Image (tube, rainbow, N blue to C red):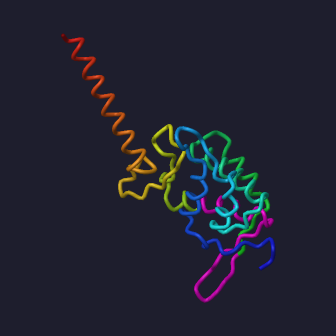
Amino acid sequence: MAPNQGRGVDVLDDEELVLGVLNTAPVVDGRPTDELDEPGAAELARRLGGDGSPAELAQLREVRELLHAVVRGEAGAVEDLAVWLDGVVLVPEVGSAGIAWTLRAPAHRVLAARVATAWSRVVAARPGRLRPCGNDECHLFLIDRSRPGTARWCSMATCGNRMKVRAHAARRRDEAASSERVD
């Protein structure tokens, strides 16, 4: 394979790839972290199909931040992502099983470009289903696979439970405050 040619775009499931990169900036113990800027970042990039080079990690961080902004609906974010993808090409390869698409980009940009194109396919296939966690203190994202499309949290076991406990406590405080006013 030529150095600027990516593997077929179906190497990793699009949803898995997008979430795998979007969720590399979690909040741990109340502090933001960056898994793409830690000692294990190169190995993480290799697991996602990249080479783990410093240039590739820098591109992944840039695309991740742009996609965070796009998914959160920040103004101008889509245009910024479009500019970054300038020169990236998907080339069709026809075979007996159909058409396979190969991404071509500079070597250090292949994985970041794959993430951006995977994001595009995810939002086309599941409109409105890729979203940030409903817990404002959490920086993770989810793809809502529920039938009614009402999933709100990255994890029911962590953020969902935490938010429900907070809502319950707030209702109890409101009830206590209103009963004190009545007395």
Left or right: 107 as drawn, with respect to 15: right
Where residue 133 appears, x then y in whole percent? 48, 45
Q: Quadrant of the C terminus?
A: top left
Where residue 76 appears, x then y in whole percent? 68, 41
Seen in the picture, residue 182 relative to 109 is either above or below; the reply is: above
Looking at the image, which residue is at 53% across and 48% down?
A: 140
Where residue 170 appears, x then y in whole percent? 33, 28
Among all residues in the image, which is located at the extreme bottom? 96
Where residue 55 appears, x then y in whole percent? 79, 58
Among all residues in the image, which is located at the extreme left? 183
Looking at the image, which residue is at 76% across and 73% down?
A: 5
Seen in the picture, residue 166 relative to 27 is either above or below; the reply is: above
Determine if the magenta segment contains residue 116: yes
Q: Quadrant of residue 42?
A: bottom right
Q: Quadrant of residue 101?
A: bottom right
Looking at the image, which residue is at 78% across and 63% down?
A: 108
Determine if the magenta segment contains residue 63: no
- Quick one: 122 or 1, which is closer to the camera? 1
Counting labels gives: 0
Among all residues in the image, which is located at the extreme front? 39
Q: Quadrant of the N terminus?
A: bottom right
Q: Quadrant of residue 103?
A: bottom right
Q: Which residues are magenta?
A: 92-120
Seen in the picture, residue 74 relative to 62 is either above or below; the reply is: above
Left or right: 121 as drawn, with respect to 6: left
Looking at the image, which residue is at 75% across and 53% down?
A: 58
Left or right: 107 as drawn, with respect to 97: right
